[in-house]
Image: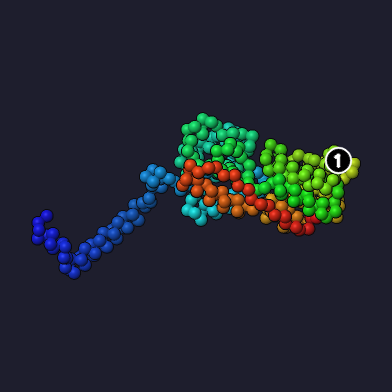
Amino acid sequence: MSPAWRAFLRRPSPTLLITIASSARRFGEKVEAAVKDLNYAPSALARSLKLNQTRTIGMLITASTNPFYSELVRGVERSCFERGYSLVLCNTEGDEQRMNRNLETLMQKRVDGLLLLCTETHQPSKEIIQRYPSIPTVMMDWAPFDGTSDLIQDNSLLGGDMATQHLINKGYTRIACITGPLDKTPARLRLEGYLAAMERAGLAIPDGYRITGDFEFNGGFEAMQTLLAQAERPQAVFIGNDAMAFGAYQALYQAGLRVPDDMAIVGYDDIELARYMTPPLTTIHQPKDELGELAIDVLIHRMAQPTLQQQRLQLTPVLMERGSV
């Protein structure tokens, strides 16, 4: 480039500046027109390869008729959206093979992080974990906790104690318990809370007053039928989640009994339907939105700083007093 040309460019005339700006604008308009004509869209895959992130989070969940899960997933998805991430949801159906296949699929899609809300009885395949050792993972509520991932859950021991103590405070002495499946940590802890409150009050638990359910509507229905067949019927029941409590309501209705006149009930989870039952269900509120939001925040923090020490966080349950006690 000649010295004269350099000098010209160092002190361009107003006419030259206008010409350059006009040319740039026309060029930009042509590019926009071409993009529209060609139906061009940026490649998320190409961007993810360049940035080494996909802005997606994978979630493994055990499908259920229990509305608790849909409410929890809704909170997780909302939190993902607010933070600029997409959620890829996979259902395990409680099946180990399906869990591992879905896990492999999520890994192949290069999700940035993983949320697990599935079964404690099945561990993810070691082969898959070894192939993708660095994937940040957060366990929610119940999951195969191995001490190497962050875990977030409610304080089920406290919640079970609170529910039972509420019934004791209301003057009930014959109090039964319908638990969830005891291979799930929350179900075991809620039962332990019930037992602790009963022991503290010096109340006996007759044979047949502890029934193991399945966290589903029908499980509560069948468990309540079993309790109604006892020689001495309980006055009140602490039920390990709201879905089973709804089933128990139906069993009482079919037997011609009323809540709480003939039997008081306390549930667990405080799903949205609980307040619309007849009578509205007294239950232990589990902060589902907070659980989902905290899980996403912990996962994003783990993705940014993978070497931090693993966390085990507990959320505090709250008693929601309504009309079933």
Most foreground residue, 50 or 294: 294
Left or right of 1, for residue 283 = right
Residue 238 lies, in percent from the top left, at 78, 48
Question: Could you tell me if residue 247 is visible in this image?
Answer: no
Residue at far top of view: 127
Most foreground residue, 320 or 316: 316
Q: How is the image coloured?
A: rainbow
Question: Could you tell me if residue 139 is visible in this image?
Answer: yes
Residue 280 lies, in percent from the top left, at 75, 57
User: Who's the residue at 50% across and 42% down the image?
Assistant: 136
Quarter-of-image position of residue 209: top right
User: Who's the residue at 87% across and 45% down the image?
Assistant: 233
Residue 102 lies, in percent from the top left, at 54, 37
- Tag 1's secondary structure? loop
Most foreground residue, 170 or 182: 170
User: Who's the residue at 51% across and 36% down the image?
Assistant: 104
Quadrant placement of the C terminus? bottom right
Amino acid type assigned to the residue bearing label 1 in the image: Pro
Q: Which residue is mark 1?
A: 206
**Count of numbered labels shown in the rendering:** 1
Residue 306 lies, in percent from the top left, at 48, 43
